[in-house]
Amino acid sequence: DTGVSQDPRHKITKRGQNVTFRCDPISEHNRLYWYRQTLGQGPEFLTYFQNEAQLEKSRLLSDRFSAERPKGSFSTLEIQRTEQGDSAMYLCASSLSESDNEQFFGPGTRLTVL
Amino acid sequence: AQSVTQLDSQVPVFEEAPVELRCNYSSSVSVYLFWYVQYPNQGLQLLLKYLSGSTLVESINGFEAEFNKSQTSFHLRKPSVHISDTAEYFCAVSGLYSSASKIIFGSGTRLSIRP
């Protein structure tokens, strides 16, 4: 499968714990995006990378959230001191072309904070 | 900044009936427009997109959407739906030439098909 992959697919954690998600984009895609989707809503942009550079962060991304893409390939999203309000589906997407911005989405990681 | 409004949160239709899912957007710049589909227990998939040129764009499974600049709309239509079209549909927009390239999504329309 050459699509965007995310790991884990599901994560249940207790409030206050740290969690880390991984995204592997489509090979050679230089742009990688993180979105969050809560029940009944569309995805909301969190942050994006061009190669290893993080170029934009949403105001939704509090200081408990950090994302990295150290070698310009896979990316990690870490949430520290999780809160119940962090429960959501975390989506990763990647794109190659700047001319049409077609983004390919992974299956997501569903986070449940108890 | 851009925003997207999907006017219907749920649309129930009978199989083989026509359907229209409405989408309006606002933007201070020119935009790309998208419809994404999310089938049950699956990830988001691009259904169709408008970049430039012909204002009517089509998908491989019979959906079409028309970009109407004066009405700032990008409604999705299908003349005859099938049970397999049951899914959530998201209208989305991104700014043309925007350095951010983030996609702004609407809140989604759940299409349910009755036999």
Image (cartoon, coloured by chain):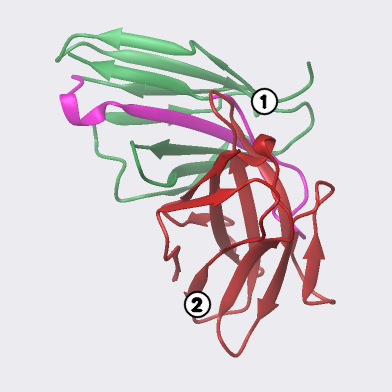
Chain colours: A green, B red
Q: Nearer the viewer, residue B101 or A8?
A: A8
Q: Is residue A106 magenta?
A: yes
In the image as oriented, which residue stretches furthest toward the bottom? Answer: B70
Q: Quadrant of the C terminus of chain A?
A: top left
Query: Seen in the image, is A18 located left or right of residue B81?
Result: left
Amino acid type for the residue under numbered disc 1: Val
Asked whether residue A66 is in view, the answer is: yes
The residue positioned 84% from the left and 76% from the top of the image is B54
Label 2 and label 1: CA atoms lie apart by 29 Å
**Residue B37 drawn above or below residue B53:** above
Which disc, if any, is residue A105? Answer: none
- Per the image, label 2 sits on a secondary structure element best described as strand
The x and y percentages for residue A67 are 43, 30
* Residue B32 rendering spot, x and y as whole percentages: 66, 66
The local crowd at label 2, few if under 14, some if 14 to 19, many if 20 or more residues have their Cα within 10 Å, is some
- Residue at image point 30% right, 51% down: A59
How far from the left and from the top, in percent, is residue B101? 59, 56
Q: Which residues are magenta?
A: A81-107
On screen, residue A25 above or below B48: above
* Residue picked out by circle 1: A4
Report x, y in % for residue A13: 25, 9
Residue A32 falls in image quadrant:
top right
Q: Which residue is mark 2?
A: B27
Please indicate whether residue A80 sits to the left or right of residue A68 in the image: left
Examine the structure image and report whether residue A88 is included in the region drawn in magenta: yes
Residue A8 located left or right of residue A74:
left
Q: Is residue A50 visible?
A: no
